[in-house]
Each structure stands twice: as structure tokens, then as C-alpha cells.
């Protein structure tokens, strides 16, 4: 693929920004509330001045969990967006989050159809020291990769990484998979149930730059090609556990705690048992750790995850002209097949 | 002043309880108590019966602060004498049970010392919580720990209801539901020294008079809220993580969601702590203010 060739991509008329998918991840909750307040004020002004409003859907995904300041009420909402869960039979006793996922699919999707919103940005926080991360299912969605690169340039003081989970369209399970394009914006470290001003501000600025990019893109701006370092998840590592009680018997080693994205070599410390022994990384390949000591992952059996890094070339892109648009109406996923 | 020249006598501190999981998602205490329940060698001392105990097992199982109501606010005289059996909130039943097993204070069966282990999302370091400024035994113990550790240790004097000879130990910052190795080890070391102190005391060692710097609680400051009670500002970046550092009138205190600064309007310098503790959003508390004080403890010796 020639880096000089500009790839035309369909317009992104509808963008969704979602917060509170996990009810205790507060930066997104407060940011979406604030944006809703601003939007009401802008809409009032636009009605008065008869302007076309920008099409940004602001969504608080899990209101009941937010009200209780918990991650979820019955089940993790951000695992409820597989095709199977969205389209299977629904009983009266269905968990709250499954009912909610269908409502969100009706609002932002349906997933996989031409009616789905063009871009979903789902806001999250983590207790891990990960800085700002984009989490996406694809390492060749040029829209998401260009938005990431734009944020890197506009926010050079914010540590930023692009995380790729190699999950097929069929298996994708999170809210951001409902849109034609989507990613999670994950920022840490922040304890759950707390809003830290520096984390909130980074998220606010990040979302603003994302929306600015979309407007520039839709207006015809050409974004030059280049490179993005992508971290692809390889595996998870669980805590050492007691065989009977399944209680953890060690904590993340002090040498590893807070060192997300610092290369982990074979024999590097992973855990420190409560009796003081060091448990070391036994893999043969040096990998990049992330989600180190994320609170919500204890119950999922994940102490940390490991990724491989590789440099991805991204082409120059611009929005399709009206003539280029028609044949592509059905093929909105076409750029991912290249 | 003459009272400080006399040595205060206390009976032997023979029975010691170590509480973890009073808040089910404060993981250092939960982990230490589970560890010592399985193998108590580390907490054994000559002539001391040290009992580790999970105070709120249902909350621990769900990894949540509480099930019905905050256990650490449940030890009121009203609750402790309430009839009603299983209709009572879970934590009230637990408070009654704990009072039965470890107290009540003043009775011959009561435990002599209770350590209640907590974590906070605030950047408080290691904080020992003192109930009374006249509690010379606790003051001497805290002085001993500080002297032995030679590190930053803070003492906070609050006004909780005193049920036991109570020493609250709060270590942060640590997110709820998370176990950080450094925080865990810090708590473990403090308890080690506390138990060493008790052993020495029981052996008849006399601890000379000492002075202890404490922070006395003044008031609770809530987040700015709108007419509907929603929070409209966050702890300012200049204040975030600055527990125990002076906050002067005019200093930045909060930052609204659209970026404006709200300044501290008090009349004098205060020392804030419990800054941005997750559990206190619902208790309408962004931080608490304290003032520095020096307390004097007389010499103490076993009676």
C-alpha cells in the first residue's frame, strides 16, 4: 500500500459519546453530564439562531449502576453486546444489563446495520497506571488510528497508547462495537468511585480533540499518513491463588506495580507472596504489561495483561466526495478488509 | 502539669483483637486477617492473645463497603441494645455480635486493645486514629511505633463513639477493591511494632513521658453542589494528594467541571486530610480540616 495515496472513507455524521458504562468509573459519568448540560445550552442557542446542530449523541449507559456507584447491577454491561446476547431470546427475569444493552443497541445500532452510529467513543477509568488508552478490536480501522494520532499530537504531555484486542466482529462484546467505528477511551490511574481532576481534564480534552477531528474530517481535511505503535493483547495472567478457597496468595510485586507498558522480561518479578517470595515471569518472550492491578479484574481472574508492540502504517485519509459515496453505501466496513 | 510526673498505671493488655474487613472492600486488612487466621505465628507475642477477626464477612464476600449500612457507624448505644433479631440491618446485627464477643468496654471479658484496619483512597500515608487526647496508653504506643519506624506517621484525633480501647489504622492511597503490595506491607509492619509495644508493656517496661504531634479534626467540607444535590466541582489539582499539607485562605480548593477555581475561604491555615476519599462522596465530605496540636502523655507502666 502506498503511503502517498489518500484513502477516501465515508462521512461520520453521527458520533456517540458514552459514559457510565461502568457506574463507578466517574470521569465519564461527570463528563457526559457536563456535556449534556452544555449541549442543552447550545441547542437553546441554536434554536434561537436556527443553526444545524452537530450530531453528537451523549449517553449515560448504565444509570442504575451509576446511581449505586457500582460497576454493574447484575452483570457487566460491557460484555453484553455480542450478536448472540443482543438478538437471543429475552425472558422477564433477564439481568438489568442485558435489557439495557438491547435499549442501547436500538439507540446506537442496530449493531452491524447501516443505521448504526458512525463512531462510538465509550469512556472508562482504570485503577491501573495506564495513562490514556484507546482500546479497539481492529488494528486497521484508519478512523480510530487517525483520531489516536491526532490526540497524540495535540496532547504531547499525556502518556497515550493504542491497545488492540484481536476479537472478530462475531465475538465482539463491548459497547463500542455497536457503531460502525468505535473505541473505548480508558484513562487511569483513578480509584473507582472517585473523580480526580487531572484524569477528568485529560478525558475532557481528549473527547474535545476527537470531536474536533471528526468535524475536520467531515469538512474534507486530508490527514497525512504515518505510523502508529499498536499494542496487541497476547494473554492474561491471574494471581496465584489458594487451591481450596481461591483467595489470592500474592500481590502484584512492588517492582511491577504502576509500571504499565514498561517491557517485562523473562524472570522479571510479577508477584510477591504474602510470605515474601517473588514469583517471576516465566514466559520466553518479553511483552508489555497493562491493566496491572485493575480492581474489576480480580473477579475475572486477571492480575495483568500482556501485549506485543508493533508499528502499523496508516495511509493518508479524507472523507469521500458525494460521488464516491454511493457505491460504498453498503460497504461501510470496506476499509477494514484492505 | 504535675500529673505528667506521675506514672499512669494500666493493667496488662492481655487480649488483643485485630479487625479486618470492617469495610469489605478495604483489602489490606481483609488480606492480613485472612492470612493470620490461617497462620497466626507472626502475631504471637509472649502473654498476649492476639485474635484476627473479619468484622463484616458479607461485605467482604461481595467486595463492597457495606451491605445495609456502614458498620463503622453502627456502634451506637441505640443499635447495640436494639431488639428485633433478624429484622435488623445486617451491620447492626454484626455490631451487636462484635460487642458481645469483644466487649463491652469495662466488663471483665472485654478485650484490652482493638486494632481496626482500614484503607483510604486519600493520600494519607499511615494514619493512626486516636479517640481521646487523654488516652496515654494509645499515645505511648503511637509514639513507640513512630520512634521505631522513623518514618512519616500521622495521628488523627476524631470523635467517634468509643466502645473499646480502640486504635484505628488507616493506610492509603489504595483504591477500593485493590491490594497494593507497598500498602499491605506498611500496615503489616505497623502492627508488628504495635504488638511489640504491648509485649514490652506487659513485661513491665516503663515508657517515659512523651509528646506526640496530632492533627485534631475541625470540620468536614462538602463538594459544591447544585440545587439538585449533584456535585458540580472536583478537588482542585493543587489540593489533590496534598493531605497533611497546609491549606491557606485563598488557596485553590475545588475546580468546577468547566474549569473554574473555587478558593478556600476559611479564616486561618488548616491541614486537610481524607482528601477525595471514595466512600465519603455519599457522606457529603470532600475533605476534613484539622489543626496541629501537641499532646503530652505521662509515663506508663503495667499496674
Image (spheres, coloured by chain):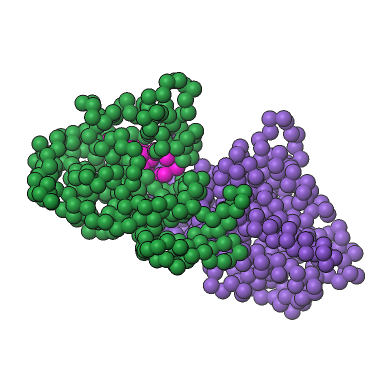
Chain colours: A purple, B green
Residue B85, x across and y down, in percent = 44, 20
Q: In which quarter of the image is residue B100?
A: top left
Residue B96 is inside the magenta segment = no
- The quadrant of the picture occupied by the C terminus of chain A is bottom right
Of residues B111 and B219, the one drawn nearer to the viewer in this rendering: B219
Question: Is residue A176 visible to the viewer in this orientation of the structure?
Answer: no
Image mark count: 0
Q: Residue at coordinates 19% horizontally, 45% vertically from top-left?
A: B136
Q: Residue at coordinates 19% horizontally, 43% vertically from top-left?
A: B137
Residue range (magenta): B17-37
Residue B34 is inside the magenta segment = yes
**B71 relative position to A148: left or right:** left
Residue A164, x across and y down, in percent = 62, 59
Q: In which quarter of the image is residue B182?
A: bottom left
The residue at the far bottom in this view is A4
Residue A285, x across and y down, in percent = 49, 60
Q: Residue at coordinates 28% horizontally, 28% vertically from top-left?
A: B104
Of residues B178 and A47, the one drawn nearer to the viewer in this rendering: A47
Of residues A174 and B225, the one drawn nearer to the viewer in this rendering: B225
Residue B17, x across and y down, in percent = 28, 35
Question: Is residue A25 visible to the viewer in this orientation of the structure?
Answer: yes
**B216 relative position to B73: left or right:** left
Q: In this view, does A98 lie above or below A172?
A: above
Of residues B6 and A127, the one drawn nearer to the viewer in this rendering: B6
Q: Is residue A317 above or below residue B193?
A: below
- The quadrant of the picture occupied by the N terminus of chain A is bottom right
Q: Residue at coordinates 47% horizontally, 28% vertically from top-left?
A: B89
**B110 relative position to A74: left or right:** left
Amino acid at each position: 500500500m502506498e503511503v502517498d495515496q489518500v484513502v477516501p472513507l465515508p462521512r461520520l455524521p453521527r458520533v456517540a459519546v458514552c459514559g457510565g458504562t461502568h457506574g463507578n468509573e466517574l470521569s465519564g459519568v461527570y463528563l457526559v453530564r457536563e456535556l449534556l448540560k452544555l449541549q442543552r445550552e447550545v441547542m437553546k442557542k441554536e434554536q434561537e439562531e436556527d443553526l444545524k446542530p452537530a450530531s453528537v449523541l451523549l449517553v449515560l449507559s448504565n444509570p442504575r449502576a451509576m446511581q449505586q456507584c457500582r460497576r454493574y447491577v447484575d452483570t457487566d454491561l460491557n460484555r453484553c453486546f455480542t450478536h448472540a446476547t443482543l438478538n437471543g431470546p429475552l425472558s422477564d427475569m433477564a439481568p438489568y444489563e442485558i435489557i439495557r444493552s438491547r435499549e442501547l443497541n436500538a439507540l446506537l445500532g442496530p449493531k452491524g446495520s447501516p443505521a448504526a452510529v458512525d463512531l462510538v467513543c465509550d469512556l472508562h477509568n482504570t485503577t491501573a497506571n495506564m495513562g490514556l488508552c484507546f482500546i479497539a478490536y481492529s488494528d486497521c480501522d484508519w478512523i480510530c488510528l487517525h483520531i489516536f494520532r491526532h490526540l497524540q499530537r495535540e496532547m504531547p504531555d499525556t502518556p497515550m497508547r493504542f491497545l488492540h484486542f484481536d476479537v472478530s466482529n462475531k465475538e465482539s462484546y463491548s459497547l463500542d462495537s455497536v457503531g460502525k467505528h468505535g473505541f473505548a477511551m480508558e484513562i487511569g490511574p483513578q480509584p473507582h468511585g472517585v473523580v480526580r481532576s487531572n484524569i477528568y481534564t485529560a478525558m475532557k480534552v481528549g473527547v474535545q480533540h476527537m470531536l474536533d477531528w471528526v468535524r475536520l474530517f467531515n469538512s474534507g481535511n486530508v490527514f497525512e499518513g504515518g505510523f502508529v505503535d499498536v499494542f496487541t493483547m497476547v494473554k492474561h495472567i491471574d494471581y496465584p491463588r489458594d487451591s481450596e478457597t481461591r483467595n489470592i496468595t500474592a500481590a502484584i510485586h512492588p517492582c511491577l506495580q504502576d509500571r504499565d507498558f514498561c517491557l517485562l522480561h523473562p524472570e522479571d518479578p510479577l508477584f510477591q507472596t504474602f510470605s515474601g517470595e517473588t514469583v517471576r515471569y516465566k514466559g520466553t518472550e518479553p511483552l508489555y504489561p497493562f491493566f496491572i492491578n485493575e480492581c474489576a479484574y480480580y473477579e475475572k481472574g486477571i492480575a495483568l495483561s500482556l501485549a506485543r508492540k508493533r508499528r502499523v502504517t496508516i495511509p493518508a485519509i479524507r472523507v469521500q466526495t458525494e460521488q464516491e459515496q454511493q457505491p460504498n453505501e453498503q460497504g461501510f466496513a470496506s476499509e477494514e478488509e484492505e | 502539669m504535675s500529673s505528667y510526673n506521675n506514672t499512669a498505671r494500666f493493667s496488662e493488655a492481655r487480649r488483643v483483637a485485630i479487625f479486618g474487613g470492617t469495610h469489605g472492600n478495604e483489602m489490606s486488612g481483609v488480606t492480613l486477617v485472612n492470612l493470620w487466621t490461617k497462620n497466626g505465628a507472626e502475631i504471637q507475642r509472649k502473654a498476649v492473645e492476639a485474635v484476627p477477626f473479619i468484622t463484616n464477612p458479607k461485605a467482604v464476600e461481595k467486595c463492597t463497603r457495606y451491605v445495609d449500612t456502614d458498620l463503622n457507624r453502627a456502634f451506637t448505644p441505640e443499635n447495640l441494645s436494639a431488639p428485633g433479631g433478624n429484622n435488623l440491618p445486617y451491620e447492626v446485627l454484626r455490631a451487636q455480635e462484635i460487642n458481645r464477643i469483644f466487649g463491652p468496654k469495662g466488663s471483665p471479658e472485654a478485650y484490652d486493645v482493638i486494632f481496626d484496619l482500614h484503607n483510604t483512597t486519600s493520600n494519607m500515608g499511615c494514619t493512626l486514629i486516636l479517640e481521646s487526647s487523654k488516652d496515654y496508653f494509645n499515645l505511648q504506643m503511637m509514639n513507640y511505633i513512630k520512634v521505631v519506624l522513623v518514618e512519616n506517621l500521622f495521628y488523627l484525633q476524631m470523635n467517634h463513639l468509643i466502645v473499646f480501647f480502640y486504635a484505628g489504622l488507616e493506610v492509603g492511597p489504595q483504591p477500593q477493591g485493590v491490594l497494593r503490595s507497598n500498602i499491605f506491607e506498611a500496615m503489616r509492619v505497623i502492627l508488628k511494632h504495635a504488638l511489640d509495644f504491648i509485649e514490652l508493656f506487659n513485661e513491665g517496661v516503663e515508657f517515659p513521658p512523651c509528646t506526640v504531634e496530632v492533627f485534631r479534626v475541625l470540620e468536614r467540607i462538602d463538594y459544591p453542589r447544585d440545587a439538585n444535590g449533584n456535585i458540580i466541582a472536583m478537588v482542585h489539582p493543587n489540593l489533590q494528594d496534598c493531605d497533611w499539607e497546609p491549606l491557606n485562605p485563598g488557596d485553590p480548593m475545588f475546580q468546577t467541571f468547566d474549569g473554574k477555581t473555587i478558593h478556600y475561604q476559611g479564616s486561618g491555615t488548616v491541614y486537610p486530610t481524607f482528601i477525595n476519599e471514595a466512600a465519603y462522596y455519599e457522606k457529603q465530605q470532600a475533605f476534613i480540616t484539622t489543626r496541629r496540636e501537641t499532646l503530652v502523655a505521662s509515663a506508663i507502666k503495667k499496674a
